[in-house]
Image (tube, rainbow, N blue to C red):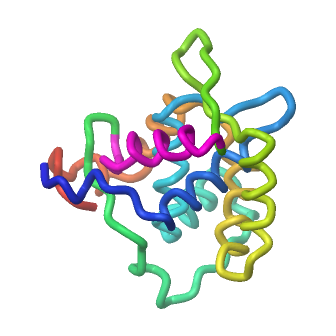
Amino acid sequence: MRKELFQPSIESEARILLLINGFTTSTQSLEGRTKLAKLDFFLRYPHFMQRALNIRKPNQVMEIAPEERNNIEGGMIRYRYGPWDPSYYAILGRLIGKELVKTISNQQGLSYRTTEKGGTIANLLGEESSWSETNQRIKLLKRNFDISGNKLKNFIYENFPEIVNTSLGEKL
């Protein structure tokens, strides 16, 4: 793979920080990279998130502007378990190195949660107009898709054949 695929952007760091913060409570963390990747897939591809909401919660409304349907920050690739961004390792490393996110060991592997500093920054960032829509969508994800990474993967496999039928390594 090309080296540039592994380089995180500041926007990616902000989005992932917001996502982890949205799933961090006093007793809960965002459990595992699979769950992180699948939730991030819905954030980056709002038309898939809209379809997913229609499947799971038909009366849940999510508006997306027509120009946003194909306007994503960067493409993900088809990986073994569905959509994946090769820069996740670098993004998580940077967030952990900046002490914005910490890892928690559990029976399934690692969970991610914002630190006090990371939570403060994420809360301020979520109030910015340029991130408010992302922050609102994270709240929708938390309300409607706070299930295991494996269940999210299976949901994508069952409901989005165009993703499953994409060749491994192909850009979505």
Indicate whether residue 8 is drawn in magenta: no
Q: Residue at x 14, y 54 (%)?
A: 2
Answer left or right for 81 relative to 45: left
Regarding residue 50, the answer to whether it shows in the image is yes
Q: Residue at x 68, y 64 (%)?
A: 137
Q: Residue at x 46, y 35 (%)?
A: 34
**Which region is colored magenta?**
82-99
Q: Residue at x 29, y 57 (%)?
A: 162
Q: Position of residue 65 (x, y in %)?
A: 57, 87
Q: Position of residue 92 (x, y in %)?
A: 49, 42
Residue closer to the observer: 28 or 114: 114
Indicate whether residue 83 is drawn in magenta: yes
Name of the residue lying farthest toward the right = 26
**Quarter occupied by the C terminus:** bottom left
Name of the residue lying farthest toward the front = 98
Q: Position of residue 158 (x, y in %)?
A: 42, 42
Q: Position of residue 9 (x, y in %)?
A: 42, 63
Answer left or right for 70 relative to 56: left
Answer left or right for 107 relative to 154: right
